[in-house]
Structure formats: C-alpha cells, structure tokens
Image: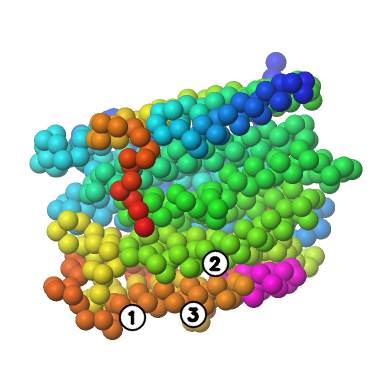
C-alpha cells in the first residue's frame, strides 16, 4: 500500500489554476459553437490568468521563513519534495503570468487580418491550396491556441519551481510541446512557420534528451533525483567525481539551449523569425524567464557544492554569448532576427549575473545574483513583448513587413509607434532612465560583488557594441528618408495598443523609479533547499 | 552493472551522431527516440545499483513524455511533408540570415 501524497493545495494553487483553465479551454473547444469560441476562450483565458495572478500574490504574502535558514530565504519544499514554493519561484510565477496576460492581448488581436486571429484558419490545409482559401472564406480560426498557451504557461511555472530533476524534465516538455505547435500556426508565411516549428522541435527534443541523460547521471552519482539530496551528495564528495562533471555538463546543455546561449543558440533566429509574432513575443519573454530560474535553481541548489567546477565554464559561455549576440545582430536585415540576436546577447548579460553566484550577506537585503536576474528578466520580458507588438503592427498587403529596409522613415509616418519602439531599443541597449539600464546595472553589480569583475568589464564593452545596432534602428526610423511609399502601419486594435502602451509605461517607470521592484526582488531571498 | 551503463552510453552516442549526420527528419527524430531509450536504460541500471525505485519511476515518466513528443513531432513533420513532398532537413532552408 503506497500512502497518498500530502499536498498543501493552497501554496500550489497557482499551478492548479493555470492547468485547470487550460483543461477548461479544451472542454469549451468541444462544447461551444464556432461562432462563440473565440470570444469565450479569450475571456476564459484572461479570467484564468488573473485568478492565478491574484492567488500567486496571496501565496507570496504567505511565504514563511524557515527557522534554520542562514540566508534570507522564504518558502518551503512542497509536494513531497517535487516542487519548491519559495520567494524567487513565486516572483517568477507572477512575472510569467504578467507576460502571459500581455501576450494574450496579442494572441487575441483580430484587427489586422480582417477580423480573424493571427493564427492559421486550419493548420491541416496545405499552404496555397483551395482548402486554405475555403478556410479563409469560412473565417475559420484555431481557438485551441489559448489552451495551448495556458499549457505552455503551466509547464513554465512548474519548470521554475521544480525541485526534482524528473519533475523538471516533465515541466520542460510540458512547456515545449505546446510551443512547437504554436510556432507552426502562423496565418501568413506558413512555409517558414512550419519550417521554424520543425527546427525548434528537432533541436528542442535533442537538447532535452541531453538534459535527461544528465539527470540520469546525476541520479547515478547521488542515488536520488531530488535537488536537495543531490546537494548533500555533492557537498560530501571526496573524489573529483567524473560522473558528476559529465552530469552537470549535460544538464547545462539542455538548460542553456532553452535560454538561447551560445553555442546552443542556433535555433533562436530561425524560430523567432518564423513563428507568429505574438507567439515569438510570449516565447522570448516567458521561456527565457522560466528556463533561467530553472538553470539557477539546479546549479545553486543541487550543484552549489561544486560551484568551482561549473562557474568557469559559465564565465566562458557568458562572454561568448554576449559578444556573439551583439556582433551578429549588427549584420541583420530582418527586425525579428535582429531581436532574436539581441535576446541571445541578453542571455549573455543574464549569465554574467548568474555565474557570479553572489549570495549576498546573511540576513541583509542586497542585490544578489538571484534578485538581479529576476529584475533583469522582468525588464527584458516586458520590453520584448512590447517590441514584438510593434513588429506586428508594421504591415503591408502581404502581412508583416519585417525587413529593416521597409522600416526606414517609420518615425515620420507614425511618430508614436516609432517612438515606443525606440524606447524599447534604448531599454535593450541599457541607456539611463530606461528600465534596461537598471537591469544591466543590477546584474553587473551582483557580478562585481561576486568577484567576477573581468566579466563586468567585458559586459560593459559588449553593451556598448550592442547599443550600436539598437541606435542604428532608431536612426533608420527617424533620420532616414522613406523609400518609395514608406512603411505602412496598420491601425492597431485596442488590445495591441494597450499592450504596447503598458509595456512602454513599465519600461519608463522601472527606469525612473526602480525602487519598489528592486525592494521586492531583494526580499525574495535565496532558493529554499 | 558497468556493462549496462556502457551500453546505454553507446546507444546515446549512436543516437546523437545520427541526429547530427542524418538528413531525413523522421530518421533524425528516431535517433532522438533512441537517445531517450538509452536514458531509460541508464535510469533503470542506476536504480538497480542504488537499490531504490526512483530511477524506475523516472523511466515511466520518460516513456509517457516520449509518446507525447512523437505525437507532436510527427504532426509537424507530416504537415511539412504534405507541403513540400519531402522531409529532408536540408531542403527546409527558407529561413536564412
């Protein structure tokens, strides 16, 4: 007789709410007539996200400090050791839910395609076939995208809080599989959308097997998949542990793939370019956040005792990621590809904060590696969703015009739109008075305190390099005469306008007044073991 | 004991090399599945070595996930095949810098 698991349903409720609404979405899909589905699904998804957000905030307020914790740490290991609900974890939940709410606005925007969603009407149709035009004629829409997004989100939330390598693997797949499907569903340019999905799928499956084999080796080394018990085995080791080194390397490969760090970045530009723009925004912001917290949790909690074995590797990865992303972005002619390389560079900056492994001073709230990365992820994610929202607005008759040459003179045609895009670019570049500056300052300060000052120097130089191509886009939009008719800007619907405006406001407010959020992330504390 | 781990490592390597050198998306995907099964072998061998059940349960989780992955993967590959009449990963090259 196996005893039933003891679950504290209250602290785990955000996960249940999101997964529950995803299942509800499937039921609605089956039960409702086609005419009502889109609106009902959108509203149900929004209700689910807001409910989960409210519950997460309440759970965060309830987190207790364990008595024996040396550093400020809040929360506890729940669900029989499978999930850790702690300060950084719940903040990540809240962050992911906010990203999802913003992305939902883009998912549900129907203004650009004559009253239809940005997703293909019937994915099974061959592009360019009669069936496809019939699907357009009958105004078919795939409303399954909303439950798919919620399933991906539930996987991300679990991924960021998993305390067990097999739970983490399942969460990794739960977040990836819906994203593979979503990537293939673009309404326009379906060939490259399908191609992006196939590349993402094959490479994603390949990398997650590496993660899994690493988990198997870590299990072989320690006799358990639980991060806490692996930590005990690692801290008590007497030998150099060749098995452990291979395990750490393989787990790192799987996780670095998800955050898009060099040399595991090859999928990023293709997938970002091919996927439907709302999905790209969601994926770029939320996947990176979830995967980064998972990466930090595995290496700080399970392999913390071997930090001198893994830190040098991550220093190298951080440097080549920052430099490679910034240099290659300069050569891009496509806005979405440029943003993809920019996201690779940002992964490098985040790795600087992470690999410093700065845990702060006991019982004092300072900017540690964890809290600076959390702040950076919020800043980067919001600006990313905003930037992709702008990309979805600049269009011509064939859909979005992502070629940079078509963006010349955008500032003269629609100054507000170009102005907000310029704001996001400045934030990415880390110019003072935007949120990106505080974010970069945070990770560099943590790295400095952690003693890895050479990384900080290279990081500052790389951001100067990156600033070049961000500013180039601004120059292109404002100070270059438009070619021919210039870019066409579709009048954005209410939802897209709200998303762009909110993202811009957050970017400015966090740049001018970062205090409150910095305070929150500083009090998030360390990961609970 | 060591033999099983060695076999699992060999299978994993064969799968990894297959992913890198084969050009047909279906075969690439089969190689990924081979790697997953190599991982399962490692899990159950380690479970026997440590004398606990964690590794065996892990193998079950992996099987379920692999099945779900097949569904998604084949759907994507079939939709590409219907469009292009080919599943070669070299011919899918519209996305370039």
Q: Is residue B62 above or below residue A167?
A: above
Q: Tell me whether the residue at label 1 lies in contact with that at label 2, contact meaning CB atoms closer than 8 angstroms.
A: no
Rendered residue at 78%/35% (across/down): A222
Magenta run includes residue A468: no
Report the residue at 66% width, 50% height from top: A297
Whichever of labels 1 and 2 marks the residue nearer the N terminus, that label is: 2
Q: Nearer the viewer, mark 1 or mark 2?
A: 2
For marks 1 and 2, give the CA distance: 23 Å
Can you give x and y, in whole percent of width and height, for residue A490 in the image?
19, 65
- Chain letter of disc 1 in the image: A
Label 3, secondary structure: give it.
Answer: loop
Considering only vertical position in the picture, is A444 above or below A208? below
Q: Residue furthest front?
A: B21
Residues drawn in magenta: A439-457
State whether discs 3 and 2 lie on one chain: yes
Residue A223 x %, y %: 77, 31
Residue at the spot of label 2: A323
Between label 3 and label 2, give the one nearer the viewer. Answer: 2
Q: Secondary structure at mark 1?
A: helix
- The residue singled out by tag 3 in the image is A431
Most extreme residue toward the top is A1
Q: Chain of mark 2?
A: A
As displayed, is residue B89 above or below residue A510? above
Report how far apart the C-alphas of labels 3 and 2 lie in the structure: 18 Å
The answer to which of A94 and A303 lies nearer the viewer is: A303
A123 on left or right of A211: left
Q: Give left or right: position of A31 versus B57.
A: left
Identify the subunit bearing mark 3: A
Q: Earlier in the sequence, mark 3 or mark 2?
A: 2
Q: What percent of the width, then of the height, locates residue A487?
A: 20, 70
According to the picture, the residue beneath numbered tag 1 turns out to be: A475
Colouring of the image: rainbow
């Amino acid at each position: 007789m196996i005893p039933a698991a003891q679950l504290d349903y209250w602290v785990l409720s955000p996960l249940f709410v999101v997964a529950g609404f995803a299942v509800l979405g499937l039921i609605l899909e089956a039960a409702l007539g086609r005419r009502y589905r889109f609106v009902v699904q959108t509203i149900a998804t929004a209700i689910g996200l807001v409910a989960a957000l409210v519950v997460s905030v309440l759970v965060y307020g309830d987190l207790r400090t364990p008595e024996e914790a040396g550093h400020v740490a809040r929360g506890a290991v729940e669900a029989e050791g499978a999930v850790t609900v702690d300060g950084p974890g719940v903040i990540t939940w809240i962050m992911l839910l906010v990203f999802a709410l913003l992305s939902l606005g883009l998912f549900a925007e129907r203004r650009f395609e004559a009253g239809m969603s940005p997703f293909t009407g019937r994915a099974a149709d061959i592009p360019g076939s009669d069936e496809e035009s019939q699907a357009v004629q009958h105004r078919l829409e795939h409303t399954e995208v909303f439950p798919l997004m919620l399933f991906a989100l539930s996987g991300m939330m679990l991924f960021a809080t998993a305390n067990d390598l097999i739970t983490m693997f399942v969460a990794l797949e739960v977040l990836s599989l819906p994203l593979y499907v979503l990537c293939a569903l673009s309404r326009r340019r379906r060939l490259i959308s399908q191609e992006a999905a196939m590349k993402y799928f094959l490479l994603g499956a390949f990398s997650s097997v590496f993660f899994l084999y690493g988990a198997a080796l870590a299990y072989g080394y320690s006799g358990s998949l639980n991060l806490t018990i692996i930590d005990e085995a690692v801290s008590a080791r007497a030998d150099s542990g060749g098995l452990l080194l291979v395990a750490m390397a393989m787990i790192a490969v799987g996780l670095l793939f998800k955050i898009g760090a060099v040399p595991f970045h090859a999928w990023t530009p293709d997938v970002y370019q091919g996927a439907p723009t709302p999905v790209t925004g969601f994926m770029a912001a939320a996947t990176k956040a979830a995967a980064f917290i998972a990466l930090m949790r595995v290496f700080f909690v399970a392999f913390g005792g071997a930090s001198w074995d893994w830190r040098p590797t991550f220093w190298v990865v951080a440097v080549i990621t920052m430099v490679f992303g910034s240099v290659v972005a300069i050569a891009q002619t496509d806005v979405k590809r440029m943003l993809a390389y920019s996201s690779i560079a940002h992964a490098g900056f985040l790795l600087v904060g992470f690999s410093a492994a700065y845990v702060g001073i006991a019982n004092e709230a300072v900017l540690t590696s964890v809290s600076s990365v959390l702040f950076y992820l919020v800043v980067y994610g919001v600006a990313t969703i905003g930037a992709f929202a702008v990309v979805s607005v600049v269009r011509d008759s064939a859909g979005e015009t992502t070629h940079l040459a078509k963006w010349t003179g955008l500032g003269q045609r629609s100054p507000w739109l170009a102005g907000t895009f310029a704001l996001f670019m400045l934030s990415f570049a880390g110019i003072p008075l935007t949120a990106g500056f505080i974010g970069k300052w945070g990770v560099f300060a943590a790295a400095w305190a952690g003693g890895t000052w050479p990384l900080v120097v290279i990081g500052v130089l790389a951001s100067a390099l990156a600033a070049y191509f961000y500013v180039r886009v601004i120059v292109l939009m404002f100070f270059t005469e438009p070619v021919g008719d210039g870019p066409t800007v579709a009048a954005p619907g209410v939802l897209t306008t709200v998303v762009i405006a909110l993202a811009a406001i957050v970017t400015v407010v966090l740049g001018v007044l970062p205090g409150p959020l910095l305070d929150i992330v500083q009090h998030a504390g360390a990961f609970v073991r | 004991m060591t033999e099983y781990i060695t076999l699992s490592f060999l299978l994993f390597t064969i799968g990894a090399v297959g992913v890198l050198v084969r050009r047909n998306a279906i075969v690439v995907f089969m190689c990924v599945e081979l790697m997953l099964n190599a991982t399962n072998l490692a899990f159950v061998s380690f479970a026997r070595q440590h004398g606990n059940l964690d590794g065996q349960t892990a193998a079950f989780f992996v099987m379920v996930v692999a099945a779900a992955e097949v569904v998604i993967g084949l759907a994507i590959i079939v939709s590409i095949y219907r469009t292009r009449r080919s599943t070669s990963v070299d011919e899918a090259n519209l996305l370039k810098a």
